């Protein structure tokens, strides 16, 4: 079976690794010229953890994980609002949980595949046509190849989905926010592993990264959904956050490759059917639930494992139907959950901030954390059973 994977992010590379375990060697293409350095911290737990264990990459993930401990939020007067300790979550999950920068996760997966599979960088799909029992794919370099299956693992603004299923507007469901994330070459002095600042309709935070750098995550309410050009991003952020405390405002003065940072609308993806003929959607291309869910990456990794498992056991059409049937109920539940989180993550009023400041320290106490982790563990997927 010839499988083409479009996208060398966590979903695409996890699928490549899982297919190799099943004796299938895929072709992976990625439009970027090299491994992407952009992105924010992602969580590996429950389903993502179970996949990583099966791939044998847990120790590599631990070695590259963020050392998240005490986290704190402040107001615009630099006064503490509340604190909590991420280590309570890890302890409640018996250590089977970690946070890692997206680019670090991608590097771990690349290293896992090294010597067994290469990625065709600076390459993307330009066109696909149905041929006899296959898909004929024309790449951006002009080459044409035939495949039994094409997997769109190219993100929530998936080019493959646009080509084969329809325009983005059919499937994107904006939640009314924008977000930006990038790496700082020089991180500020921080007493906590994460420091966030919160105001009405806006919040921004810094993660301390082990190599001495820092990572940002800015989020603000914005009903506009158009793309912001790279040359306009710095000014856009300065207009919104330029008057904030220096720990935040100073990040906007550093030399940043704005065309290599994450800057986009926060939107979910809802696609009625994840496959059409010999093309199937994976990860954010199929079911983006946004970073608000905290489970998008782990769910994408689980989807990759399930898809590879089904493809090894069944004809393509049956495998795609089973993959969707096994994963979709979980993605729908997580999407519904993340829609509710937005109003809490970016409070709409001063009262909302006060409620957050009172409620979150209570909810972060060990008994409540254990309950939250128990509910999360209950969402574990049976990865070793194919659908009948």
Image (cartoon, rainbow, N blue to C red):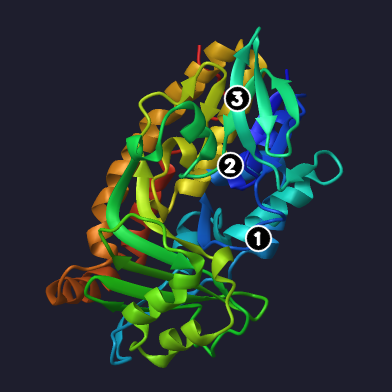
Q: Are marks 3 and 2 in contact (CB under 8 Å)?
A: no
Residue 104: mark in rendering: 1
**Quarter of the figure with residue 327:** top left
Q: Residue at x 39, y 35 (%)?
A: 330
> Closer to the observer: label 1 or label 3?
3
In this view, the residue farthest toward the top is 132
Q: Can you see residue 71?
A: no
Residue at image position (51%, 23%) is: 323
- Local secondary structure at mark 2: helix
Q: Residues within 10 Å of mark 2 (few under 14, many from 20)?
A: many
Side of 126 relative to 20 (left or right): left
Element at badge 1?
helix
- Would you place residue 335 above or below residue 66 in this image? above
As rendered, which of 318 and 79 lies closer to the eye?
Answer: 318
Q: Nearer the viewer, residue 233 or 335?
A: 233
245 or 58, which is in the foreground? 245
Q: CA distance from mark 3 to mark 2?
A: 21 Å
Distance from the alpha carbon under mark 1 to that under mark 3: 32 Å
Is the N terminus in the top left, top right, bottom left or bottom right quadrant? Answer: top right
Furthest residue toward right: 115
Q: Earlier in the sequence, mark 2 or mark 1?
A: 2
Residue at image mark 3: 128
- Please report whichever mark, 1 or 3, sits nearer to the chain's N-terminal start: 1
| Image: 37 above or below 55 | below
Q: Residues within 10 Å of mark 3 (few under 14, many from 20)?
A: some
Task: Please state the horizontal and vertical placement of residue 12, each as a whole percent of the image.
Answer: 62, 40
- Residue 62 shows up from this direction: yes
Residue pointed to by mark 2: 11
Name the mark on residue 159: none
């Amino acid at each position: 079976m010839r499988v083409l994977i479009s996208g060398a992010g966590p979903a695409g590379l996890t699928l490549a690794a899982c297919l190799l375990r099943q004796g299938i060697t895929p072709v992976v293409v990625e439009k970027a010229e090299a491994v992407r350095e952009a992105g924010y911290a992602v969580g590996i737990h429950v389903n993502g953890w179970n996949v990583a264990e099966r791939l044998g990459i847990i120790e590599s993930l631990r070695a590259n994980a963020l050392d998240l401990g005490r986290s704190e939020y402040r107001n615009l007067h630099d006064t503490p609002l509340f604190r909590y300790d991420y280590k309570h979550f890890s302890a409640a999950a018996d250590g089977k949980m970690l946070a890692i920068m997206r680019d670090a996760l991608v590097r771990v997966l690349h290293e896992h595949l090294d010597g067994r599979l290469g990625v065709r960088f600076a390459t993307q799909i330009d066109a696909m046509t149905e041929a006899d029992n296959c898909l004929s794919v024309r790449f951006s370099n002009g080459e044409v190849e035939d495949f039994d299956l094409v997997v769109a693992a190219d993100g929530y603004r998936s080019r493959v989905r646009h080509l084969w299923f329809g325009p983005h507007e059919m499937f994107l469901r904006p939640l009314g926010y924008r977000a930006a994330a990038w790496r700082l070459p020089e991180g500020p002095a921080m007493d906590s592993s994460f420091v966030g600042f919160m105001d009405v309709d806006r919040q921004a935070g810094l993660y301390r990264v082990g190599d001495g750098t820092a990572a940002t995550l800015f989020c603000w309410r914005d009903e506009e959904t158009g793309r912001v050009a790279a040359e306009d991003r710095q000014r856009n952020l300065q207009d919104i956050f330029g008057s904030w405390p220096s720990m935040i405002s100073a990040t906007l003065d550093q030399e940043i490759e704005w065309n290599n940072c994450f800057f986009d609308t926060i939107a979910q993806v809802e696609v009625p059917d994840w496959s059409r003929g010999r093309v199937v959607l994976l990860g954010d291309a199929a079911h983006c639930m946004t970073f608000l869910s905290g489970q998008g990456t782990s769910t994408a990794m689980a989807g990759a494992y399930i898809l590879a498992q089904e493809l090894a056991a069944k004809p393509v059409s049956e495998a795609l139907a089973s993959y969707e049937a096994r994963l979709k109920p979980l993605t729908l539940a997580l999407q519904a959950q993340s829609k509710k989180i937005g109003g809490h993550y970016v409070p709409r009023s001063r009262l909302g901030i006060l409620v957050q400041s009172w409620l979150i320290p209570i909810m972060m106490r060990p008994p409540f954390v254990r309950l939250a982790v128990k509910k999360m563990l209950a969402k574990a997927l049976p990865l070793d059973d194919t659908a009948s």
